[in-house]
Image: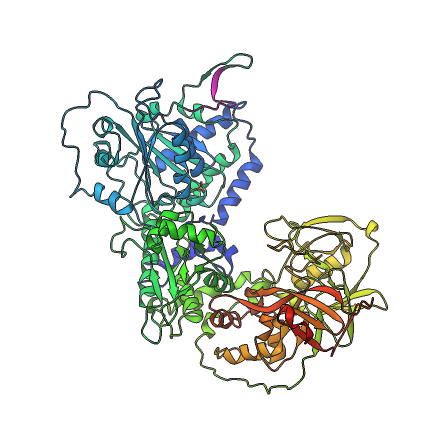
Amino acid sequence: MTTLSNIFENDQMQIITSEFTRLGERCYLDNAGATLYPQCLLKNINEDLLNNVYINPHSDKYTQDCIEQIRYHILSHFNTDSSTYSVVFTSGTTQSLKLVGESFQFAPDENEVLNCGSLVYLRDNHTSVVGLREIAAEKNVDIIHISHEDFLKALDPTKVSLPTNGREKYKNEGNTLLVYPAQSNFNGYKYPINCMDIIKKGCLNQYIKKQLCKINCSWYVLLDAACYVSTSKLDLSVVQPDFVCLSFYKVFGYPTGLGALLIKNSSANVLNQKKYFGGGTVDIVLSSEDFHVKRKILHERFEDGTLPFLSIIALKHCFDALTKLIPKIINNDIMDTISHHTYSLAKDLYHQLGKLHHENGNKAVITYMDTDFTDISKQGAIVTFNLLREDGTYIGYSEFQHMADLFNISIRTGCFCNSGSCQRHLNASNKEMKDMYNAGHKCGDDVDLIDGKPTGAIRVSFGYYNTFNDVDKLIVMICRCFVRTKYNKPKRTMNDFIKLKSLKYAKNISSEENHKINEEEFFEEKYSTIQQPLIKSDIVLSQISLFPIKSCGAFKINTSWKIGSKGFEYDREWMIIKDNGVCLTQKQNTRMCMIRPKIDLKRKVMILYFKGLAPISVPLNPLENKHKEVTICQSKVCTDLVKGYDCGDEVANWISNALEISFLRLVKQASHDGRVQKTNTDEDKKLLSLSNQAQFLLINKATVRWLNDKIQEPLFMEDIEQLTDRFRGNLIINMDEELVERDWQRVIIGKHEFRVDGQCPRCQMVCIDQQTGEKTVEPLRTISEQFAGKMRFGIYLSYMGPIDGSREHMLKINAPVKPIINDEDISR
Ligand SMILES: *Cc1c(COP(=O)(O)O)cnc(C)c1O
């Protein structure tokens, strides 16, 4: 076995990975979500578009010819040609499915609406298939779903039961459309596809409800090949479904928004119910009379409007890039070679996961597979699983996701738009699914466990650019975070692991790569525990911290500070944005914490410090009308728009220098910006600065000490101050008792009353050492472990006002802190 692949030689594999250097240290394991494009592909596309003139194919014969050439290319990729299949370009698999659903004639002849056939689908389909039933329902069609087991039984050649009635069909009693995936996007199971003949002969007739149809309906197969074709060869000279749908980004990584529907010419006549017509799809249309004739050439009837011709032109380079990059090792075929390479990675991961056990002997992994990786014709390059704790309880997938993020591993968790498979493997009944929904769980959220039961899983999927190193990185991460066992690296990867890494990244070290977790250090035995003496004190406010620039360093105050309408004055009033207008955070650049701001109220400036650079100052209150006003997306869903003012070129250049990222800008929140808290309740929503959730964050040092004692990580050695800093609290108190703050409802500090707005959810940000920007696994791992996956630390506060009606809004260090646990408790 070689060190990187057991299909490609090491040097071949290195040529491949050299096309993905943009990944840096990131380990990409979500090929089924989208594959990655090789870098040469974009160069070639750019070159082509820069040097040639492509025009709307409706006006230009040359562009049209190029597109026809690419249709030919697509067909030959699937080992067929235009005498047997036609290519219809769509925006992707989902649109292809929809197009068939809309156009399919379920009735026995074109003008009849009675005696319609059925829509039959496998329950384990992608959501985009299940949605077809809404179209079918409008067409008076029976909707039938078949379970995974029943489907396989009906298609099993040794058990297949064809209708006993041997007589020839004398009358068509309607058309039935069967839709199923060639490969499950849930766990990579490959459904039988070499069975079109027995389907047509009626091996599934028993599931049809209409009596006559049991004998006389005609079966058509719509094969969802989206997942399958990304890593497998579909040979349409052998397997001939009536319709095949796919998305090109899953095969090549580029372009997005382009897919195809392949139609077997001899079955095209049943797709005659398409309603809409657009530019390019009609031979004649009268705008003032209900008269139009659709085009005769198949694809012309289906491709409404102007084709995405530049994306289609790009496809040519996609095929070329794969041809250039992938040696034809297996069956003299590119896709078969990719298939074997990726399969062997998945198989290796599957076996390594199976071996993971906790110290007490309990299994650490539960897999959700339909094969045990013994047959490549039944299994693709996907492994789906959940992790178990030592006591057998589940680890939620969002907890896993946080850790994967920290280790720079891209991986998909949840149900992957396949609720049928999810239900089957997680053993969840329809009722339980609805209960989960009613309990607040929605597709795509991070409610990963309900009553200890998982609502989804972890999916690893491999592409041709992955190597055994990626498998090992994932296993190392799992061992490191969730299974307290020593990881034995399989022999194969020992030698070249380090060598390859240095080769791959030597020329490419960017600022961010300095802080990545180093796998080699994980297993060094360096145990030491730090005991901090308990400091006795009454509860007082021991520290105030501001974070003037979102995600940058703290400005610690040891006297007093003014509370404004949005929190502490000048707390998170600035942010750094990238050239795409999106706010930069420590998640993307850990060096941000080393930009240390200081507020000088006398001189009315904020001074920024960064090691190696001369300090720079910006005015605290720039004349807003003098600066460019900007509107920025503050969160990834861009519903949270913030109004601000650009702080000018000088400081922008300074920050770009410090963080080693070009074109950064510093933006100050506009004083009139009315950003408010997002809460589920209607209680009074407070104005916010650029902080994420609430005006203030309070941290109890006793809880930090408690956490520190729980951390068993040998390499994690920090004093309490350092550990406290990671939580980036505004108000630090020092009690004797840990965790008590979690029950507070209100708190009075000095003369000021605050409302508690819940606990602060934590992510990988707490894993960044605020002094050095270095990333560690702790303390997130221990927080997650101690709070059963609920990663909360610290409490949010909103300012309610002074208790004595005074106008003084200064909060003083050493002010007494009086917690109020419930409202009756107010006398305390
Ligand atoms: C990805 C996928 C789809 C949906 O594809 P889109 O590109 O999102 O339209 C449908 N079915 C399967 C099996 C898939 O893997």
Query: Residue at 45% across / 33% down in the picture?
Result: 90
Q: Residue 308, position in %: x, y?
A: 51, 33
Left or right: 142, with 91 as reference point: left
Left or right: 817, with 306 as reference point: right
The coloring applied to the image is rainbow
Q: Residue furthest right?
A: 602
Q: Residue furthest top?
A: 289
Q: Residue 597, position in %: x, y?
A: 73, 67
Query: Please, what is the dominant secondary structure of the magenta stretch?
Result: loop
Q: Residue 670, position in %: x, y?
A: 76, 53
Identify the image quadrant of residue 128: top left
Identify the image quadrant of residue 773: bottom right
Q: Is residue 281 magenta?
A: yes
Q: Nearer the viewer, residue 472 or 787?
A: 787
Q: Is residue 112 magenta?
A: no
Identify the image quadrant of residue 74: top left
Q: Nearer the viewer, residue 648 or 614?
A: 648
The quadrant of the picture occupied by the N terminus is bottom left
Q: Is residue 160 above or below residue 38?
A: above
Q: Where in the image, quadrant-wise, is ligand 1 located?
A: top left
Q: Is residue 463 visible?
A: no
Q: Which residues are magenta?
A: 274-284
